Image (spheres, rainbow, N blue to C red):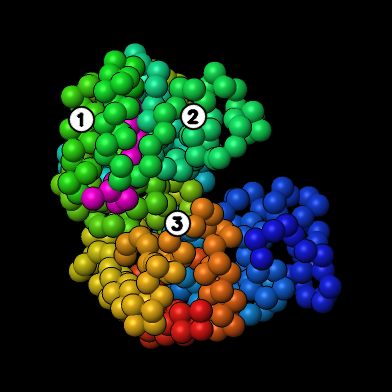
Amino acid sequence: MTGGTVASTSGTPSLDWLTTVSQIIPAGCSTLAKTPNRLLPGHGAIAAVCAKDAEFTDLDGRTWLDCEMAMGTATWGHARPEVEEAVIAQLRRGTSFSVADPLELLLAQRLLDRFEVFESAKFAKSGADAVSGAVRIARAATGRALVVATEYHGWHDWAASAHYATEPERLGIPHAVSELTLTCAPDDPERLTDLLRKHSLSVAAVVLCPNRWTVEHLRAVVDEARSHGTLVIFDEVTSGMRMGRRATCGEVGIWPDLLCISKGMANGLPLAAILGARRHVMRAEDVRMSNAHSSESLAIAAALACENLLDAAPEWPSFRVRTQAMMVTLRSRITELGLTGRVEVRGDYSSFSLGTPGAADFWTDPFRAHVLPQLADRKIFTKGYFVFSDRHTPEQLDNVERAICAALATY
């Protein structure tokens, strides 16, 4: 299930596509998280042709309940009318201009109104670019070279060398570069404190995904970093639009020096942002952070439409309470079935998964191998993570809960 691609044997459109694409596009898709080798070729969906609300249709004409929502980017639901209308209207006005579009300033102001502790914003096209830009800013601001990484922070040299359990040369990264990144597991304040004290005058930034830390530990390491003159970067690329109106930092009242957000900002269109104090964010010009498409107008128009949706939402995220209840039910069911120690629920309402405690590799986890085919039989799509949207109905979420409980009962 998690190995390489398979040859077409049935002649279905999806398997025929897979045979061809495997020879042309590395891993079958330019976004590694969407590659067929993480899916169920011949059984589950591997390529989509259209999507609406919380469902998509695959290349074989089958309709699936989407429990990943394009890696969490389609937070408001696929083909959301308000976003569609904004993008189409902007497309008619122009996609990208030879000078700045005033919409960029308008979006920056909307974000700074929402995240009122910050003063400036810099846009990018991906979360990895935003976090890497924040690291460059931190190095320029502090005159220091070392960075502490605590999670997957993107494919760029400084981050990939720390995340993947392989020699950096295999990733095309020189040791001289990889040695500038120190690593620490999430929610390990002792290790992070030790690193900061050992390299007190050398660490430019600590990069954290705050929703992966307890509030007590998060506050402690943020205070520790600042006591050493180290900048704190929150990588909320995934959680920023899903934890609350002001991301995890607003939920817990702990603010970084630089905040990076992306997925869900423009409901699937590519956009990211760095927010922070003016003295820090303005250094983006000094470090020459730029991209020809960072200020293109379609994604910005979509993001403004999403800000309007957020302003109108009576509560956000709308799926918080139901997802939390589902996680409670699943944990109770695990206990009732005597599966404690064999299966656990991980994550939070922004994104959760089930797996084997202590399993080294999520993609080869035996429970994942058990549950995915059962969900696929019910036309529920997931890669193992459950990421809901504003368009998931109560009935659909009930269906997901029942399906997972049924899979637990046969494990």
Give residue 358's mark: 3
Q: State which mark lies toward you, 3 or 1.
A: 3
Picture layout, residue 129 above or below residue 364:
above
Q: Quadrant for the N terminus, please.
A: bottom right
- Range covered by the magenta-colored residues: 205-214
Q: Position of residue 305 (x, y in %)?
A: 35, 57
Which residue is painted at 38% across and 37% down in the image?
Answer: 184
Picture layout, residue 382 above or below residue 222:
below
Q: Position of residue 321 (x, y in %)?
A: 25, 72
> Magenta segment: does it hold 210?
yes
Q: Callout 3, which amino acid?
A: Gly
The reply to whether residue 78 is in sight is no
Q: Callout 1, which amino acid?
A: Glu
Which residue is painted at 39% across and 47% down in the image?
Answer: 237
The residue pinned by badge 1 equals 224
Q: Residues within 10 Å of mark 1 (few under 14, many from 20)?
A: some
> Magenta segment: does it hold 51?
no
Q: Secondary structure at mark 2?
A: helix
The residue pinned by badge 2 equals 158
Query: How far is the residue under mark 3 from the one under mark 2?
Result: 27 Å
Q: Quadrant of residue 257?
A: top left
Q: Callout 2, which amino acid?
A: Trp
